[in-house]
Image (spheres, grey):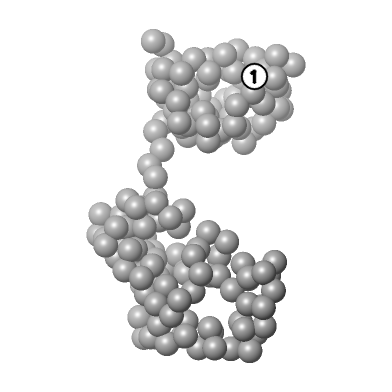
Amino acid sequence: MSFKWRNDMMPEKFKHNDLPHHPTCANYDIDQIEQSIMTSKLYNKISQYPNLQALNKPSLNDDNLNGTYCSSYNHRVRTEGLSIWGAPGGRPVRSAIDWAIKVEYNQGTDNLRPEGVKYLELIKMRELWKRTELEKKVWMKKLLKERIVKRAKSYKLNLEE
């Protein structure tokens, strides 16, 4: 599904106002297209091989086609604001500390002392995002102390607590 078409279907509170309207997707009967795909020779050939059946899905995260899967998915986008990650409620909103954590992970081990490298590799970014704000701030303070070269741009975060 294109990002523009998903945005067209999203409930107003989740729409990106800066995206143009998708000009053609609404003109197609998605169930008819899905059923045509399911009756194709290629689809049926792939269905015969269990180790290739994932190729018959819209993506690896999607369920199997059933003739109405795509329209059912579109309905969920319209009513629940289903994000590209499959979660209701549109795109997740990151806090300032989560953005700062992402920046640090993107910088990686550059300009980090050996202790900082160990600390950075101790936990994955997405796992860290699940922790409390206080735990994130403690992690950030420790990591920033291990940076040899301080960055010119500073975070607008209150790391005291």
Position of residue 64 relative to residue 160, above or below, is: below
Asked whether 20 or 53 is in front, the reply is: 53
Quick check: can you spot residue 22? no
Which residue extends farthest top?
A: 161
Which residue extends farthest right?
A: 114
- The residue positioned 60% from the left and 12% from the top of the image is 145
The x, y position of residue 158, in whole percent, is: 40, 17
The x, y position of residue 103, in whole percent, is: 56, 33
What residue is disc 1 on?
119
Question: Could you tell me which secondary element the residue under label 1 belongs to?
Answer: helix
Position of residue 50 relative to residue 128, above or below, is: below
How many labels sit on residues?
Answer: 1
- The residue positioned 39% from the left and 10% from the top of the image is 161
- The residue positioned 45% from the left and 31% from the top of the image is 130
- The residue positioned 50% from the left and 88% from the top of the image is 36
Quick check: can you spot residue 107? yes
Q: Amino acid at mark 1?
A: Tyr
Asked whether 70 or 138 is in front, the reply is: 70
Position of residue 30 relative to residue 106, above or below, is: below
Residue 21 left/right relative to 136: left
Task: For label 1, count other residues whose C-alpha is less than 10 Å away and answer few (under 14), some (14-19) or many (20+).
Answer: some
The x, y position of residue 90, in whole percent, is: 35, 53
Residue 37 left/right relative to 66: right
The x, y position of residue 45, in whole percent, is: 67, 83
